Image (cartoon, helix red, strand yellow):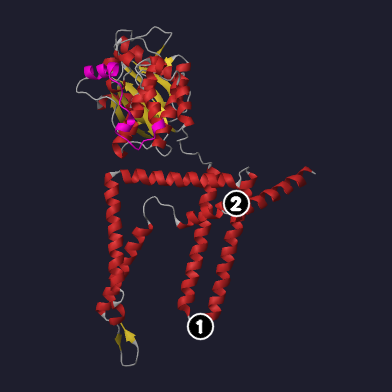
Amino acid sequence: MTDAILERLQGALAGRYAVQRELGRGGMGAVYLAEDLALHRPVAIKVLPPEFAVQPVLRERFIREAQLAASLSHPNIVHVHAVEAHGDLLAIVMQYVDGETLTERIARSGPYDAQDCAKLLQDTAWALGYAHARGIVHRDVKPDNLMIERGTGRALIMDFGIARQERASALTEVGHSIGTPHYMSPEQAAAEAVDGRSDLYSLGCVGFFAATGQPPFQAESAHKLLVMHLTTPAPPVSTLRPEFPPGLGEVIAHALQKEPGERFPTGEAMADAIGMLQLRSREVAPLLRLFHQQTAQSLQTILMLVVIFAIFVQFSGRASTLFGSVLFVLFVTMGVTVLLQTLDRVRFTVRQGFTVDDVRSAIGAMRDETARAREQLLADPVERRRIQRRKRFAMFGGAVAGAQMPLIPKLLARRLDGTTEIPAVGVLLLLAITVVSGISLALWASRPVRVTLAQSTAQRLWGSAFGGWLFARAARRYARELRRLAT
């Protein structure tokens, strides 16, 4: 693909799409980021190289990809919007996914943990089951064809370029194996007829890769890889990840059986088997997530007010009694206001149908999310070294500042009038101690991906009998309101 092709694409699609930049390229063409000018949304445009577009077989195969993908509507399948044909310029306009391929994700952050691996496999199995029920086999399920959406972690299958309808005449007949050797099923390796169970074998290979960082079979040639798929039993995931949950490892092993009849019969069956393990992270309703965040913010405000008032009382002196009383009333008023706002949130949450048990479950799920995010962060060697350096500096700086504090009184110089002053050396030392202490405290307070004191306090609040009483009281009040409205 050259710049001339990009210019031709921009010219051919002018007025409908604003083609911006290249996103990537593969054996069947390059993909560009563009804006749909009518709907004001980002799209991805896949362009078949002109030298391929003029070949009838490849052109038909490329158009068939668009037709097959356009007939599928599933949240875990990249949707096709349109096909653009302009002479030897052939392009597919499809959904843009803000994310990265599974290959890129594993290269960046290492193998998945059990929860993310379960989510990946279950989402993909559902999508494949949906396609298989409509007579469509993907035939090239691999990490490069799985997009991981940024922020949500949702997996989307893309590139049905070698997919085929089981009942249609195929461009790839029996006797010609098509797929990727590391992820090819035994029946593909033998150039035999395939059905949806072939995709599930490939998904088993993908699961092994996601869990361990490498495919189940490795060899120096494609021929040897195909032979291994045909004859060599796949190794258990536990050989490379002993701590990996055995149940999920068994699901992957089941998908990697040599005989199609010994695998899961459908994608739904594989997804159900994963669901029974209950490894996926619990979904948290946005309202409950917001409720927990707002409660933590309210508690953090109250804690800050208490600390500020305590510091004032410690250093104000008796002459400021009146001002201290006014400040005390101000702080109490602010604290009571924050508490009343929290009670209003409880009542609103109850009106939306949630209970205190829902809140407790959501908080537990969010704590699990935090723990998993921390594990993923620490799994990155570069970030782990950076965190360790910051931690060492914080500890060292705090220790040095603490050791220097006793020297400050000794630097005070008493003047003739009885007052004291700090010489220039003392001022510099005090400034240095203050700077080092500030940096150390900031680094320590901003430790990566941690549960804050306010969040822990919120969890204890709603996990207590008092929290349950607040929700029960709000529920009774709401029930009375409903009765009044009914009369």
Q: Which residue is mark 1?
A: 318
Read off the residue under disc 2: 345
Residue 375 is situated, as x and y percent measured from the top left of the image, at 36, 45
| 151 shown above or below 227 | below
Mark linked to residue 216: none
Give how far apart the Cα atoms at labels 2 and 1 are.
40 Å
* Residue 229 in magenta stretch: yes
Q: Earlier in the sequence, mark 2 or mark 1?
A: 1
- Examine the structure image and report whether residue 446 is included in the region drawn in magenta: no
Residue nearest the viewer, comparing 385 with 80: 385
* Within-10-Å neighbours for mark 2: few <14, some 14–19, many 20+: some
In the image, the segment drawn in magenta is 222-247
Residue 26, image quadrant: top left
Residue 426 at x, y percent in the picture: 27, 78
Q: Nearer the viewer, residue 45 or 86?
A: 45
**Residue lying farthest to the left in this orientation:** 220
Give residue 401's position: percent from left, percent from top. 30, 69
